[in-house]
Amino acid sequence: MESKIALKEIKKYFSSKKGTVKAVDGISFDVKEGEIFALLGPNGAGKTTTLRILATVLKPDSGTAIINGYDILKEPEKVRKSIGFLPGDSGLYHRLTPSEFVDIFAELYGIPKEVVKKRKKDVFEALDIERYSKTIIDKLSTGTRQKVLLSNLLVCDPPVLILDEPAQGLDVLAAKTVEEYLLKLKKEGKTILISTHIMEQAEYLADRIGIINEGKIVEIATIEKMREATGKKTLREMFLSLVEK
């Protein structure tokens, strides 16, 4: 299967009062077409920095990545048109309605209005936010805002999704709705990279799991292979055994 995301020895260091922080320290991995890959790690491990580099929000100090055939350093505009990036922090315009917000970004992507209308209806219904489509975003709950952000990406219909904590702020039922939709997208051939702290979500969704700690990849494997390697049963136990070495 073709790799839709391929990281090549990416490094990103930051200066602090305590010295140099090696946020991402020479990591390489790939995500195949039609695969869900979950990146797990403790706080400060380098997950969000990695995703921001792939989304061309940050530039790596060295190394690069190829997304959908485009180099993040040489062809950042083409990369941006190939991905849907869900950041861990909100990027919503709170004075707009969900419908208006999605329309604006779809127009930037150059998607015809009749296509947007159809996709928006389907996605809003699938994520159960149709009833909030005309409500000012500032009046919505945290969970509903998160689903609006996700809806925006899905209406734009990129081949690659990069999602930082996609279930953030969602209750169990809302998270299940999002998870089922991601599995549907996988069946349609989308490539999905997620970062999450929710072990059950990663275990349920991911074809493969990468564990990052102190800026380095410590393991990449399927759940079954990771279980064999660690001798542990649950993903939580496997994760702890690998990051506490």
Image (spheres, rainbow, N blue to C red):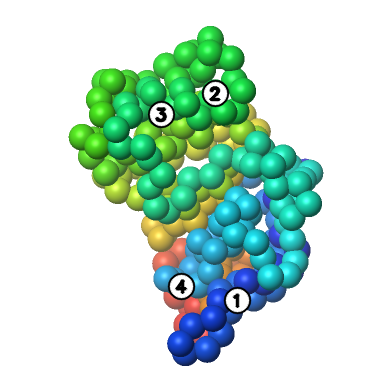
The answer for how far apart the CA atoms under marks 1 and 2 are is 36 Å
Residue at mark 3: 101
Residue at mark 2: 107
Residue at mark 4: 44
Residue 223 vs residue 210, the one in the foreground: 210
Image location of residue 44, percent across then percent down:
46, 73
User: Who comes first in sequence, dot 4 or dot 1?
Assistant: 1
User: Who comes first in sequence, dot 1 or dot 2?
Assistant: 1
State the mark number for residue 13.
Answer: 1
Instruction: Decide: is 205 above or below 145.
Output: below
Residue type at the position of mark 2: Glu
Residue that protrudes farthest toward the left in the picture: 139
User: Who comes first in sequence, dot 4 or dot 3?
Assistant: 4
Relative horizontal placement of residue 218, taking residue 101 as reference (left or right): right
Label 3 crowd (10 A; few <14 / some 14-19 / many >=20): many
The answer for how far apart the CA atoms under marks 2 and 3 are is 10 Å
**Of helix, strand and loop, which one carries label 3?**
helix
Residue type at the position of mark 4: Gly
The answer for how far apart the CA atoms under marks 4 and 3 are is 31 Å
Residue type at the position of mark 1: Tyr
Which quadrant, please, contains the N terminus?
Answer: top right
| Residue lying at 61% horizontally and 23% vertically, measured from the top left | 110
Label 4 crowd (10 A; few <14 / some 14-19 / many >=20): some
